[in-house]
Amino acid sequence: MALERQVRAKVLAKRDPQQEQEAKEWVEAILGKSLGDEPFEDAIRDGTVLCQVMNKLSPGSIPKINTSGGQFKMMENINMFQRAMKEYGVADNDVFQTVDLFEKKDMAQVITTLFSLGRETYKHPEWKGPYLGPKPSDECKRNFSEETLQAGKTIIGLQAGSNKGATQAGQNIGAGRKIIIGK
């Protein structure tokens, strides 16, 4: 029981209320409506809100959203959202597990996934905003002339063995090593 309590405390410590608020505001801005005063985790728990967000980002990506039914129908919503996110471009290792949200086991991971989705929207020119999180950096491709590449081959880097005459002479840290033969 003590281990379970420690694990629960560690997971709760990862939560960042400011990030959760940013994610909630982003979802509300995309949908154009307020999620109300209930906790964000409760508002998105059944997956319907997340599916609606995904359909705004990528129209038609989730054709049928379950609005009624049992727990399995709600978990199916979450699974459809996860699949649509991966198709949209979010890396598989950035996507939370279904139980993280449905059973509220790791809301920090759910928020991290929403930030990953928010960053991915920058890469879709058809999406005009709002955005969540920092803009990913663009590739900075460098083109060197053949002359520059050849000149670089003549330079010996310090990692290649040259130390430009540096030695450890004169460095005495602590007591010197004394070898006494016969003792």
Image (cartoon, rainbow, N blue to C red):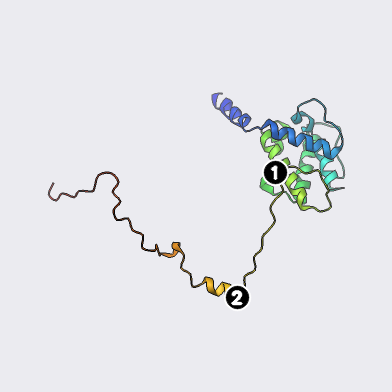
Say which of 63 and 56 sits in front. Answer: 56
Looking at the rendered image, the quarter that the N terminus falls into is top right
Q: Residue 31 appears in which quarter of the rendering?
A: top right
Left or right of 129, for residue 161 = left
> What amino acid does circle 1 point to?
Val
Which of pointers 1 and 2 indicates the residue nearer the eye? Answer: 2
Say which of 157 and 96 sits in front. Answer: 157
**Secondary structure at numbered mark 1:** loop
In the rendered image, which residue does mark 2 sit on?
146
Q: Residue 66 appears in which quarter of the rendering?
A: top right
**Secondary structure at numbered mark 2:** helix
In the rendered image, which residue does mark 1 sit on?
95
Q: Residues within 10 Å of mark 2 (few under 14, many from 20)?
A: few
Q: Residue at x 77, y 50 (%)?
A: 88
Where 103 falls versus 91 (above or below)?
Answer: above
Left or right of 30, for residue 120 = left
Say which of 166 and 117 sits in front. Answer: 166
Left or right of 71, for residue 9 = left
> What amino acid does circle 2 point to?
Glu
